[in-house]
Amino acid sequence: MKRILFCITRLNGGGAERALSNITLAMPDDVQIDILVNCENPEKDYIHRGRVIPITQISKKIIRIPFSLKVFIGRYYNLLKLKKTGKYDACISFMDESNIANILTGNKHCKVILSERTTLSQVKGRKYDYKIKPLAKRIYKKADKIVTVSKGVADDLKSHFNVPVDKLEVIYNGFNINSILTKSLQQIDMIFEESSFYFLNSGRLDEAKGQWHLIRAFAAVEKKHPEVRLIICGEGLYLGILKKMVERYALQKKILFPGFVKNPYAISRKSDVFVFPSMYEGMPNALIENMICGLPIIATDFRSGAREILAPHTNYGYQVKDKIDMAEYGIIVPVCSGKKNLENEPLENEEQLLAQAMLKLVEDNDLRLHYKKQSEERAQDFSIDRKIVRWLELIN
């Protein structure tokens, strides 16, 4: 019997958490699974298999240190103890701080396997610039294997973080296609107007996702087609910023924020087009999940993943500039600048191209049906059963 220890911050909220959930559910029944998390949240946690082990809390009365440091210490000592006593074949960690703890606690008792899910060199912020990136450059190469979700992420680790090629393994995210299609048929409380056209976006509301660019492009589309609507599913630090933008555009009745949605696939089924304006990614779950649900896709040519999914026969290192790429499995537009312009400022060129791509799918029913069929076809390549075989080969 194989024993696997997973380590992640939580089991809800984002793509990494959903990917771990998918992997645990698809593992053979004779694989024993434990999952170390900061804390449980049964109401929001994605469905998963295995025993969940929350990090032991450190008393505030004993140690007065910042919360983030307490979490790091708690994760480190719990991980070290579990590795020594759990007789695991491998510890597989998701997300940067868990990856670092996995390496620091060593591979004496089990294999150390990291899952790197984003183009780390492009992630911004003081925590990454002064802690995560310097540590990754020094210690990531000590892992037994690093599984990346795209070729672009693998290249990033090789080029910027000194990871040897023989330690890198590309395994695309896997999905239970039948389960997603079944869930998409469930009823939801949200009312969809038959006369309206619905754009959909989902994911964390943060810097990387670029939803403010989508709102600006949508406002331009809405001027030509008042029947359009935009649904932005998810939670995050940028919720307040995005809602204020919507208020300034006076689009409160046309841009909806349902928050965390336990079954987003039911919303996907009733929507018309999925739009993904990210600044950078690894391999976005939401994009593929919406392809499974049959939505035509518009995505920015972020690093990395969009081109590998939507234009797999092109050079994944290429990025489109100053034009719309009508790719094989979806529409690819240039990445926006990241500037948070106000509503009275003209659209930047990339936002104009995003708006033009959206207009194409509103106005051309045949094009929309074409990309719907292409989404459904391409989604079959991401079946979870194909990916689990690769994961098990790494553990053996």
Image (tube, rainbow, N blue to C red):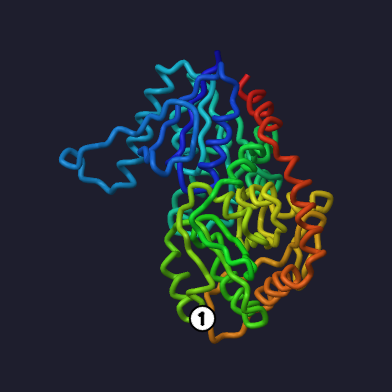
Q: Residue 378, relative to residue 331: is it above or below?
A: above
* Residue 52 locus on image (x, y percent): 41, 30
Foreground pick, 115 / 232: 232
**Which image quadrant: the N terminus?**
top right
Foreground pick, 173 / 280: 173
**Which image quadrant: the C terminus?**
top right
**Neighbourhood count class around disc 1 (C-alpha, 10 Å): few under 14, some 14–19, many 20 upward:** some
Q: Residue furthest top?
A: 1
Q: Residue furthest left?
A: 61
Q: Residue at x 37, y 41 (%)?
A: 41
* Residue 38 locus on image (x, y percent): 37, 39
Q: Residue at x 52, y 62 (%)?
A: 191
* Residue 71 locus on image (x, y percent): 34, 41
* Residue 16 locus on image (x, y percent): 54, 43
Q: Position of 105 compared to 292: left or right? A: left
Q: Residue at x 33, y 35 (%)?
A: 74
Q: Residue 49, relative to residue 284: is it above or below?
A: above
Q: Residue 276, relative to residue 383: is it above or below?
A: below
Disc 1 marks which residue? 249
Foreground pick, 322 / 239: 239
Q: Residue at x 45, y 30 (%)?
A: 35
Q: Quadrant of residue 172?
A: top right
- The local secondary structure at tag 1 comes to loop
Amino acid bearing label 1:
Tyr
